[in-house]
């Protein structure tokens, strides 16, 4: 799959350097695989949640949340937000 907006990852890693390894691991799994549906994605990421049309990945034991829109038919992942769990709970990413 192709990731749109590596910038969101870079910015978050600059602000939260301890998130680098888990986020880069997530990126590696996404980029090296072809997921055609939610079941396949859930098999690779068993802590993923579907919130409306968005996928919410729990990263690093739920310390971080990555919110993305996934287009399975085009094999594209659009990163909407990368947040700490605390910031995710505030809900500002929904707007």
Image: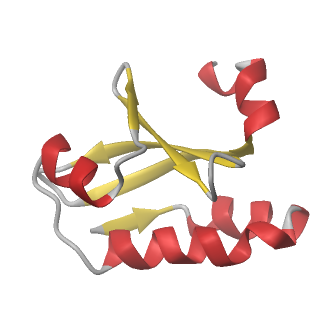
Q: Is residue 52 left or right of residue 94?
A: left
Residue at the spot 86% in from the left edge and 63% down from the top edge: 16
User: Quadrant of residue 59 in the image?
Assistant: bottom right
Looking at this view, name the residue that lies furthest to the front.
Answer: 61
Q: Residue 48, image x and y in percent? A: 40, 42
| Viewer-proximal residue among 90 and 2 | 90
Residue at the spot 78% in from the left edge and 20% down from the top edge: 90
| Viewer-proximal residue among 60 and 27 | 60
**Is residue 31 depicted above or below 8 in this figure?**
below
User: Quadrant of residue 92 in the image?
Assistant: top right
User: Quadrant of residue 80 in the image?
Assistant: top right
| Viewer-proximal residue among 12 and 95 | 12
Q: Residue 58, image x and y in percent? A: 55, 46
**Is residue 70 depicted above or below 1 in this figure?**
above
Query: Where the N terminus falls, by quadrant?
Result: bottom left
**Is residue 55 depicted above or below 75 in this figure?**
above
**Is residue 30 depicted above or below 93 in this figure?**
below
Residue at the spot 77% in from the left edge and 60% down from the top edge: 12
Looking at this view, name the residue that lies furthest to the right.
Answer: 15
Residue at the spot 64% in from the left edge and 18% down from the top edge: 95
């Amino acid at each position: 799959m192709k990731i749109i907006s590596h910038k969101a990852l870079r910015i978050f890693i600059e602000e939260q350097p301890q998130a680098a390894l888990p986020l880069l691991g997530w990126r590696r799994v996404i980029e090296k695989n072809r997921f055609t549906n939610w079941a396949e994605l859930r098999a690779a990421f068993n802590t993923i949640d579907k919130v409306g049309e968005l996928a919410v990945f729990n990263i690093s034991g739920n310390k971080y949340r990555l919110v993305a829109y996934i287009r399975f038919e085009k094999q594209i992942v659009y990163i909407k937000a990368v947040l700490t769990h605390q910031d995710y709970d505030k809900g500002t990413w929904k707007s």
